[in-house]
Amino acid sequence: MIEGLKVDSVNRSYIQTHIDKVLVNYDPVGCLYAYVIFYVTSKSFSEFWRKCEDFIKNEYEFPYVVKKPLYEVNHMYTESRHAKVVLERNGKETMVHFYALAIK
């Protein structure tokens, strides 16, 4: 399951709606992998990511039990970020990946 959204700021309700889409609305059978891709147009990509990561970690209420909290995945690209959370859905792990990509 993949959901992409173009953002220029951390609009919490907009982001929440799209995360809900990929985890609940589009996935009635329980896909083990979900991806949320932020196409970021803000002037400060690192500031966007800091606020977005904080929102997902501390404010967003996942519809399933959080088995492993959100953590950043280290990778070699400077204009993107990757974070992952592991949820438990009906006794199985579901991995949700969040990618943020700076676009000009």
Image (cartoon, rainbow, N blue to C red):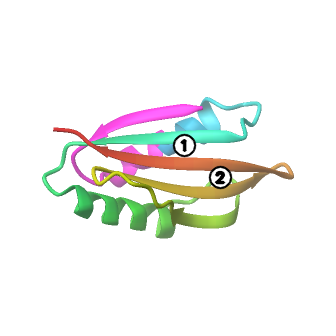
Instruction: Point out which mark residue 20 bears.
Output: 1
Residue 26, given in percent of the width and then of the height, sits at 61, 29
Badge 1 marks a residue whose secondary structure is helix
The quadrant of the rendering that contains the C terminus is top left
**Where is residue 70, by image quadrant?**
bottom right
Residue 10 drawn in magenta: yes
Residue range highlighted in magenta: 1-18
The quadrant of the rendering that contains the N terminus is top right
Residue 80 drawn in magenta: no
Measuring 60% from the left and 58% from the top, which residue is drawn there?
85
Above or below — where is 95 with respect to 104? below
Residue 5, given in percent of the width and then of the height, sits at 36, 36
Above or below — where is 28 with respect to 73? above
How many labels sit on residues?
A: 2
Pointer 2: what residue? 63
Q: Amino acid at mark 1?
A: Asp
Q: Residue furthest right?
A: 91
Measuring 36% from the left and 59% from the top, which residue is drawn there?
52
Q: Who is closer to the viewer here, 54 or 83?
A: 83
